[in-house]
Image (tube, helix red, strand yellow):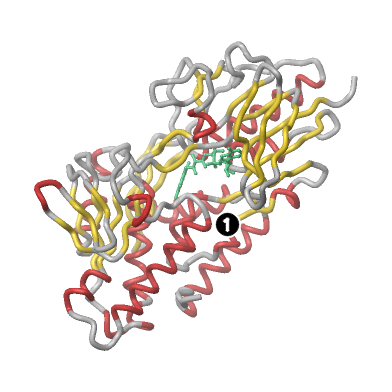
């Protein structure tokens, strides 16, 4: 029997874990994705302030697994019955049809604007390298504009007010990174602005890091309060404008930059797919990650979940599913089967800046906060980096930032 055609959609955590392990003797592998690299998202907030360079967080897909086919494009329509995918190039008008024997949907999810007016136009998301680049540029631009002669005190205060909407791990880590930037690099590069920038986190729930244990949430609030970072919970954003944020009862919050990290929405490809899904739109799979009723069609990561249990939208879930699917497909090529997928939770941590973090879970189920949680976060993120290249570049970037300051030139 000839090789089976395996088509993988996406180059995120799930796809890369699969790609690294799949047996190329048994499968003819094609990857279609709008980006030709993998992005290590846990350290994206560090790249928004110049602690870590953008290229240290990416892995080129082609170099990672020679022998595969890669096409730069987006799947726009799936015909699961006919076993074909319609694809559209993201840098030209080229369009093509990709037939498959086995399909793996690993397209992740997108940031949810919840239809709030002005979010798409005026707020920044943080999911891709391009997002991090735009945020860094905006931060530096605001620091420069606030330093211009003749700028009014009101306009200066607005430009130097940075707001994260969404007090989950992304918003909290961004505030932590920003705190470090303002604490250590502002006196060096913008001494005239020291003490002027403000950081605010807004969340519609009753706490930041609401998925963490109460003691860690309280610790986080205490640490941020001691640094002058404002946390406003139970606060719903009604609109974002060029000048700031609109809140209920006619209140407006002038600010110079808004990071929007309020939640996830379905990937448009998944939204348009007529298969069984949970109420939030994630594709249901069987325990072996196959779509019910579609032999040879699998899904991993944020866009999916087993029908029988809830799984969080985390890199560690996507990664373990990608590994599992590689083992399962490699076994199938030899006529063997493997046991159903079981997620083994690892610890989750959030960096708070200032050498502190919070961490919980994993095998021991223990909780940590402060310096030792920070060390654990550093060690865990380093271990999870997917290549020797990144494992060398990330510490080198940290050392460079420590010795020479963060890279915050306006490029
Ligand atoms: C800032 C940030 C920090 C995070 N920190 C952590 C953390 O510390 N720990 C943790 O466990 N999780 C973390 N996460 C969550 C983690 O990144 C996700 O859970 C994980 O990336 C999901 O992996 P995935 O493979 O499902 O999708 P993704 O990694 O999102 O990848 C999706 C892929 O599909 C591609 N794609 C999209 N649409 C199409 C299409 N139509 N056709 C083809 N390809 C398509 C995309 O370009 C991308 O390559 C973080 C996320 C963010 C944004």
Measured as percent of width and height from the top left, residue 21 is found at: 72, 36
239 is higher (above) or lower (below) than 112: below
Residue 22 is left or right of residue 37, and the answer is: right
254 is higher (above) or lower (below) than 282: below
Measured as percent of width and height from the top left, residue 244 is found at: 24, 60
- Marker count (numbered): 1
Residue at 66% of width from left, 45% of height from top? 89
Residue 231 is left or right of residue 307, and the answer is: left
Identify residue for label 1. Answer: 57
Q: Is residue 57 at all visible to an observer of this figure? A: yes
The CB of the residue at mark 1 lies under 8 Å from ligand 1: no
Give whichever of 169, 243 is nearer the camera: 243
Residue at 40% of width from left, 38% of height from top? 264
Residue 309 is left or right of residue 400, and the answer is: left
Q: Residue furthest top?
A: 293
Q: Is residue 372 at all visible to an observer of this figure? A: no
Q: Residue furthest right?
A: 1
Measured as percent of width and height from the top left, residue 147 is found at: 30, 83
Give whichever of 360, 333 is nearer the camera: 333
As helix, strand or loop, the secondary structure at mark 1 comes to helix
Q: Quadrant of residue 140?
A: bottom left
């Amino acid at each position: 029997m000839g090789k089976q055609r395996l088509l993988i959609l996406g180059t995120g955590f799930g796809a890369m874990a699969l790609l690294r392990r799949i047996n190329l003797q048994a499968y003819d592998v094609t990857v279609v994705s709008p980006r030709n690299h993998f992005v290590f998202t846990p350290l994206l907030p560090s790249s928004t302030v110049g602690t870590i360079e953008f290229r240290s967080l990416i892995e080129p897909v082609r170099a990672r697994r020679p022998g595969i086919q890669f096409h730069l494009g987006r799947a726009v329509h799936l015909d699961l019955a006919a076993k074909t995918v319609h694809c559209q190039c993201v840098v030209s008008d080229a369009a093509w049809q990709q037939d498959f024997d086995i399909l793996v949907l690993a397209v992740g999810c997108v940031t949810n604007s919840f239809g709030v007016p002005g979010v798409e136009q005026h707020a920044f998301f943080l999911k891709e390298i391009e997002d991090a680049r735009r945020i860094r540029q905006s931060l530096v631009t605001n620091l420069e504009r606030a330093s211009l002669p003749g700028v009014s005190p009101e306009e200066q205060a607005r430009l130097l007010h940075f707001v994260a909407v969404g007090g989950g791990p992304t918003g909290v880590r961004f505030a932590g990174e920003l705190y470090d930037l303002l604490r250590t690099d502002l006196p060096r590069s913008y001494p005239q602005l020291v003490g002027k920038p403000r950081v605010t986190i807004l969340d519609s729930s009753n706490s930041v890091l609401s998925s963490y244990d109460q003691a860690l949430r309280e610790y986080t609030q205490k640490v941020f309060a001691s640094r002058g970072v404002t946390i406003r919970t139970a606060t719903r954003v009604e609109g974002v404008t060029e000048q700031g944020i609109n809140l209920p009862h006619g209140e407006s919050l002038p600010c110079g930059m808004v990071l929007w990290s309020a939640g996830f929405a379905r990937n448009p490809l998944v939204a348009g797919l007529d298969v069984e899904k949970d109420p939030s739109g994630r594709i249901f799979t069987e325990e072996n990650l196959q779509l019910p009723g579609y032999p040879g069609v699998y899904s991993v990561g944020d866009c999916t979940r087993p029908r029988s249990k809830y799984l969080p939208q985390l890199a560690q879930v996507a990664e373990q599913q990608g590994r599992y699917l590689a083992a399962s497909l490699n076994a199938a090529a030899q006529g063997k089967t493997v046991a159903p997928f079981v997620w083994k939770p690892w610890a989750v941590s959030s960096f708070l800046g200032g050498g502190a973090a919070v961490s919980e879970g994993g095998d021991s189920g223990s909780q940590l906060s402060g310096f030792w949680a920070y060390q654990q976060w550093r060690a865990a993120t380093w271990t999870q980096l997917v290549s020797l290249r990144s494992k060398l570049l990330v510490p080198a970037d940290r050392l460079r930032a420590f010795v020479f300051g963060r890279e915050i030139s306006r490029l």
